[in-house]
Image (tube, rainbow, N blue to C red):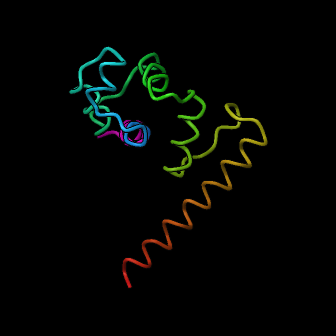
Amino acid sequence: MDKQNSRVGQTISIFRETRGLTQKELADKCEVSNVYISNIERGLKSPSRKLKSKIASALSVSDLEFDATMIVFNGLPIDAKKFNSNQIEFLSTLQKLVHDRFKNYQSEEIS
């Protein structure tokens, strides 16, 4: 399993679940099989750029929102070519917040 594929799959899964869609419903909207969506979400397959865009659209998010969510929840470096300075500042702050909350959550679970 490729880390990048896994990150893309997790991001799709987050959006799909928050939208209350099944893998089958998302697959139908994107004109692919639910098995293929399942494989993407599990990090076994990588969607083409075109399909990733189609998935984002079916989930009612822009490509930029999709990429930003991947960055925040996976602690990825922020590409200055993709985002303006205000967006970079926002993403950095959000990334730190998510990281701190996760760290606190883990320490509460251990205690």
Residue visible at 59% across and 46% down in the picture? 77
What percent of the width, then of the height, locates residue 76?
Answer: 54, 47
96 within the magenta span: no
Classified by dominant secondary structure, the portion drawn in magenta counts as helix
Number of residue marks: 0
Quarter residue 5 falls in: top left
Quarter residue 51 falls in: top left
Quarter residue 21 falls in: top left
Residue visible at 56% across and 49% down in the picture? 72
Q: Is residue 84 left or right of residue 40?
A: right
Check the picture and name the quadrant holding the C terminus.
bottom left
Q: Is residue 26 left or right of residue 102?
A: left
- Which one is nearer the viewer's eye here, 35 or 48? 35
Residue at the far left: name it. Answer: 35
What percent of the width, then of the height, locates residue 22?
Answer: 29, 34
Say above or below: 53 vs 10: above
Residue at the far front: name it. Answer: 20
What percent of the width, then of the height, locates residue 24?
Answer: 25, 27
2 within the magenta span: yes
What percent of the width, then of the height, locates residue 29?
Answer: 36, 19
Residue visible at 54% across and 30% down in the picture? 61
Residue visible at 53% across and 67% down in the picture? 101
Check the picture and name the quadrant holding the N terminus.
top left
Q: Which residues are magenta?
A: 1-14
Residue at the far bottom: name it. Answer: 111
